[in-house]
Each structure stands twice: as structure tokens, then as C-alpha cells.
Image: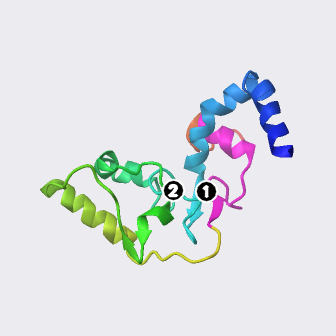
Amino acid sequence: MIDLCCQLLKQKYLRRSQFWRGMNKIKHGFSWGMVFKVNNGKSVRFWDDVWKGESPLRITFLRLYDLSNNKLDVGSDFLVNGNWHINLRRPLGLQDLKLWKDLTSLLEGVQLNVAKDEVSWALEKSGLFTTKSMYRWFSHRGVVQKNLGE
């Protein structure tokens, strides 16, 4: 019953508010600040979250992402019995095979366990989210500007 009440309030008030519209405009930025440690792989979006390397796999392996049939799946959907299974729209060409080898090398050694995935905020040394770091990221792409006279 509480969930239904929350949904009703969200529909009525949040969708039309300036705050909600603003949050929807910047929600993609949260993905760039969050870094995941994969455990069970159930909450880490395989292609879109930062969990292996310094950027989402869809950026690093754009060609393979374009060929993937499973763009929205989480990590645990791709790892079956210790082997990576990425459903592609067509067979890979020679150039794509090199990317595939690079991806599988990057993923080598990843094993899932029963613990929940962990997330930290990469834009703060503490690993904790702050609005200041988010604002700095959107304003200056994370570069801290200091006054020279100080």
C-alpha cells in the first residue's frame, strides 16, 4: 500500500516539478561518478556502468556495444558458468575480433559471488557522494579551479 501511495505522489508532484525535470537532465552524470566493485553482478549495468577500467565498457568498446543485443543487461546476465556470453547481432569481422579479444582479456578473472555489488563515488577521495563534487564535475569536468592569489 505504501509503494502505491509513493507512486501516486511521484506521478502527481515530481514529474511536473522543476527539480524533477532538472534531475532527469543530469541523471547520466551520476553514472560517470559511480564506480562499482562487482560481487554478484546483479546491480551493475554491463555496458553503462564503470566497473572494469576507467570508463563504461560501451565507451571503450563502442563497436561491440553497437553489435550487442543486450545493451541494458547487468553483469550477471553475461557471465554463465564462468564464461562470458554476449549475444551479438552478427558474426564478428577481423577488426571486431581484436576488440573482442581485448574485451575478454579485460574481463578475465572476473568471478561472481553472493555479496551485493558495491559502489563508491570516484569524484571524492572519501568515496562518498557530495553535491559539491557533482557540481564541480558538471561545471568543469572535475577540474578544481583555484585562485592564484590565495
- Residue 145 visible, this angle: no
Taking the magenta stretch, the answer to whether it contains residue 17 is no
Horizontal arrangement in the rendering, residue 83 relative to residue 4 (left or right): left
Q: Who's the residue at 35% across and 49% down the image? A: 69
Label 2 residue SS: loop
Earlier sequence position, callout 1 versus callout 2: 2
Residue positioned 60% across, 50% down in the render: 33
Is residue 64 visible to us here? yes
Q: Nearer the viewer, residue 141 or 96?
A: 96
Which region is colored magenta? 117-138
Q: Is residue 136 in the magenta section? A: yes
Q: CA distance from mark 1 to mark 2?
A: 10 Å
Q: Which residue is mark 2?
A: 50
| Crowd class of label 1 (few under 14; some 14 to 19; many from 20; radius 10 Å) | some
Judging depth in this view, the residue of 9 and 64 nearest the camera is 9
Q: Which residue is mark 1?
A: 122
Quarter of the rendering occupied by the C terminus: top right
* Three-letter code, disc 1: Ala
Residue drawn at (64%, 32%) of the image: 24
Figure quadrant of residue 13: top right
